Image (tube, grey):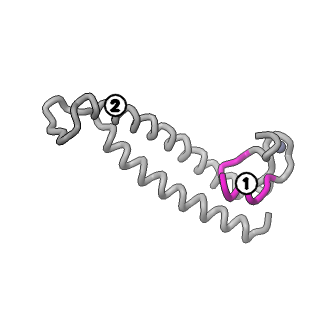
Amino acid sequence: MTEEEKTALRDRILDRSVEVEVRIEQLREATQPISPDKGLGRLTRLEAMQDKSVNEAALQRLLDESTRLHNALMNIMQPDFGNCQNCGQAISIERLQAVPTSSLCMECA
Ligand SMILES: [Zn+2]
């Protein structure tokens, strides 16, 4: 991987991190406890509770992704960044661009 590719990838990870952080904030709001007397507009309380559990699942996925992005940013500084953690082969740049948090090559994933 060239330094240029590495820089582009780091920018991509940073951009995605920002998106994820914004979304996490929104979902944290959306997963606040629902107070029984709160005006819910057109949503019934049951619908609100269903939404809440969907949002909680989405929040959990984003928190996981946030951790992986954070790790990827730490790893990108390491000399062996971009190598498969299983077989040690270089992970293709296309794969890393599509999924910057990949730690396995196409064959091992
Ligand atoms: Zn591999």
104 up-or-down from 34: above or below: below
Q: Which residue is mark 2?
A: 50
Q: Position of residue 15 (x, y in %)?
A: 54, 61
Residue at 58%, 50% (x, y): give it.
70
95 up-or-down from 9: above or below: above
Q: Is residue 94 magenta?
A: yes
Q: Position of residue 79 (x, y in %)?
A: 79, 57
Q: Amino acid at mark 2?
A: Gln
Q: Earlier in the sequence, mark 1 or mark 2?
A: 2
Q: Is residue 50 magenta?
A: no
**Label 1 beta carbon less than 8 Å to ligand 1:** no
Q: Position of residue 76 (x, y in %)?
A: 70, 56
71 and 32: which is toward the camera: 32
Q: Amino acid at mark 1?
A: Arg
Residue at 42%, 47% (x, y): give it.
24
Q: Residues within 10 Å of mark 2 (few under 14, many from 20)?
A: few
Question: If the image is split into quadrants, where does the C terminus sit?
Answer: top right
Q: Position of residue 50 (x, y in %)?
A: 34, 31
106 up-or-down from 92: above or below: above
Q: Which residue is mark 1?
A: 95
Question: If the image is split into quadrants, where does the N terminus sit?
Answer: bottom right
31 and 106: which is toward the camera: 106
Q: Give the residues drawn in magenta, as a range.
A: 91-103
